[in-house]
Image (tube, helix red, strand yellow):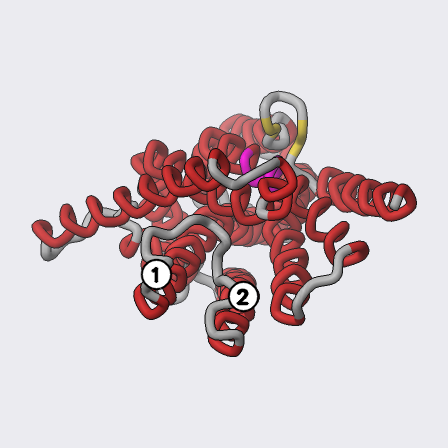
Amino acid sequence: MESRGTYRGLKQIRLIWKILYLVPWTKFKKCYYAWMSFIVGINTFLTLTIILDIVFCGGIKCVLKHMTYYLAFLSKVVQYLLMLLARKKLLQLDNLFQILDEHVVLPEDQAVAKKAIETSHRICKYFTIACIFCIYCKIVGFVFTLGQVTISPVWSPFEEYIVVEFLYDSMIPHLMLLQTVANDMYPPTCFLLLNAYLKILSQQLLRIGNEDREHPIHSNIPTLVECHVTILKIYKILDETVPKMFFVELLIASILLCISITSIISESMEPSDIMFTVVLTLSLLFQILPICVLAHQFQSFSEELTDAAYATNWPGQDRAFRRAILLIMQRAQNCNPIVVCGIVPINLPTFLSIVQYAYSFSAVYSMMN
């Protein structure tokens, strides 16, 4: 099942994790530590240049003008550091998903898993394309204006050398792109796979319920309980790792949405800047939407799992069968949504509230001007 399961579902994210040294290299260990030093050094240097740029920017207006870049870069650096701290837990996900893969045998179950994998690939691909388009809007603007439109307004030590500055300013956004995909795409990917396995588990329970009462198949029940426990272990890891990173993402994305929508409405910008801001706005929405929808969907699938467990004709079965079904129902009903900072749940209403507040802020700002 590995060829159609976890490996394919997570391989894009794991590849980027390897590039960013979040996953240990099995080969070239000396190069691994050298590359690790380079990545950490670039993130540290970028943070220092942003701080220096804010200090010597020349006024509050200059800081506000470049606030989009400051917040975007700093948020990705912070999220990357949080992923570094949580990588031991994240590396457990692959093994847990492989345990679930072993029990996906029937064609109808494999079809559900395959659909989830393909959807995760599409989400990751479209998000990456949007980010790349965002970067190359600035690069094209830099090339056609011979450096008058900067790729990044953050201070660079190579301002006197246009070619070196171009290479440096091009490298930083590409590194931020990798960190953005690594940070923002692993929760939706994991939730897609989790939701698929919950659906598969519901299908397996319904098949037991449709069996002849006189000849029930009890041998699958311990396996189904084990699968549900594994699903909850994965969910617990996400509950321990996602809120910290999503708090940074939620806070910064909300501010950037307000700034970018207001900029599109009220400011006169270069064509490359307009395209960059529009694509940035769409990318910010796409950062938050998948995880909110899929985390919300996880709760719905948990309720469906409870209904499927109840439909197994469990009251008339033996004690071991009834106990197993009751355990599944109890755990499914007690699965609480992931909450950021104990206040904001990760679900669809949260996303709609963010969009509403961002639009309201930009509308009020445009009316005042």
Is 251 magenta? The answer is yes
Q: Amino acid at mark 2?
A: Val
Q: Which residues are magenta?
A: 248-252
Residue 105: which quarter of the image?
A: bottom left
Q: Amino acid at mark 1?
A: Glu
Name the residue carrying label 1.
Answer: 160
Name the residue carrying label 2.
Answer: 149
> Is 241 in front, or is 356?
356
Q: Callout 1: helix, strand or loop? A: loop
> Is 326 in front, or is 153?
153
Helix, strand or loop: magenta stretch: helix
Q: Disc number at residue 316? A: none
> Is 285 in front, or is 75?
75
Q: Is residue 174 above or below residue 43?
A: below
Res 192 visible: yes
Picture residue at 39% right of the left edge, 48% below the top:
97
Picture residue at 19% right of the left edge, 51% below the top:
35
Do the residues bearing badges 1 and 2 touch, measured as CB atoms within 8 Å?
Answer: no
Image-based side of 86 in relation to 349, left or right: left
Res 230 visible: no
